[in-house]
Image (cartoon, rainbow, N blue to C red):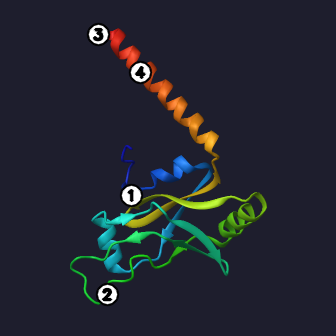
Amino acid sequence: MAEKQGIKPVAENRKARHDYFVVEKLEAGLSLVGTEVKSIRAGAVNLKDSWVEEENGELFVLGMHVSPYEKGNIFNRDPLRKRKLLVHKKEIRHLAQEKKLKGYTLIPLQLYFKRGKVKLELGLCKGKKLYDKRADMAVRAAKRDIDRALKQQRR
C-alpha cells in the first residue's frame, strides 16, 4: 500500500476483504483519549474482529482492540471499549438506511493518520458466501500461475 500525501497507514483489516464485498467506503474520525492516540501511533491496534453499530443516531466502533499505552498510568482506558465515530448526521442516516433495507454491515477497513488526526475507513459491506470465497481464491491462484509462467518465459 503506497503512502498517499499526508496519510500514514497504521492498521488494515485484511479479513474484512476476505469475508465481505465492499460496496461503499466512507472516512470517519474517532473520538479518542490521548494515551489511545499514542498507542495507535505505536501501531498497537487490531481491527480484525471489529464492527460498527448505530445507536441513538450515532455510530460506534466495537471490538477494536487498542492496547494500553506502556507509559500511560491511570489515563489508560479499557482496550475493547466502544469508541464514538465522528460522522455527519446525513451520512449516518444514509448508512443506517442501507443497513436496514439491504442488510449490509459496517466494517472498519483501515486505520490511518491524516494530517495528524486518526481516521477510520469504513466499508458498507455485503457478506460473502463460501462459494464466493472459493471463486476469489481460484482467481488469485490463476493470476499467480500466469505471473509465474511469464516470469519463467522472460528468463
Q: Earlier in the sequence, mark 1 or mark 3?
A: 1
Which quadrant of the figure has residue 26? bottom right
Q: Quadrant of the C terminus?
A: top left
> How far separated are the C-alphas under marks 1 and 4?
28 Å
Disc 2 residue crowd, few under 14, some 14–19, many 20+, Cα 10 Å = few
Q: Earlier in the sequence, mark 1 or mark 4?
A: 1
Under circle 2, the secondary element is: loop
Q: Position of residue 58 (x, y in %)?
A: 62, 77
> How far separated are the C-alphas under marks 2 and 3?
59 Å
Q: Position of residue 44 (x, y in %)?
A: 31, 66
Q: Which residue in the structure is indicated by mark 4?
A: 147
Q: Which residue in the structure is indicated by mark 1?
A: 11
Which residue type does callout 2 highlight? Phe
Disc 4 residue crowd, few under 14, some 14–19, many 20+, Cα 10 Å = few
Under circle 1, the secondary element is: strand
> How far separated are the C-alphas under marks 1 and 3?
37 Å
* Residue at position x 41%, y 21% in the image: 147
* Residue at position x 43%, y 76% in the image: 80
Q: Earlier in the sequence, mark 4 or mark 3?
A: 4
Which of the two discs, 4 and 2, sits closer to the camera? 4
Q: Earlier in the sequence, mark 2 or mark 3?
A: 2
Residue at the outermost bottom position: 74
Disc 3 residue crowd, few under 14, some 14–19, many 20+, Cα 10 Å = few
Q: Which residue in the structure is indicated by mark 2?
A: 75
> How far separated are the C-alphas under marks 4 and 3?
13 Å
Judge by depth and name the residue closer to the eye, 92 or 61.
61
Which of the two discs, 2 and 3, sits closer to the camera? 3
Side (left or right) of 117 relative to 127: left
Q: Position of residue 5 (x, y in %)?
A: 38, 50
Q: Earlier in the sequence, mark 4 or mark 2?
A: 2
Q: Which residue in the structure is indicated by mark 3?
A: 155
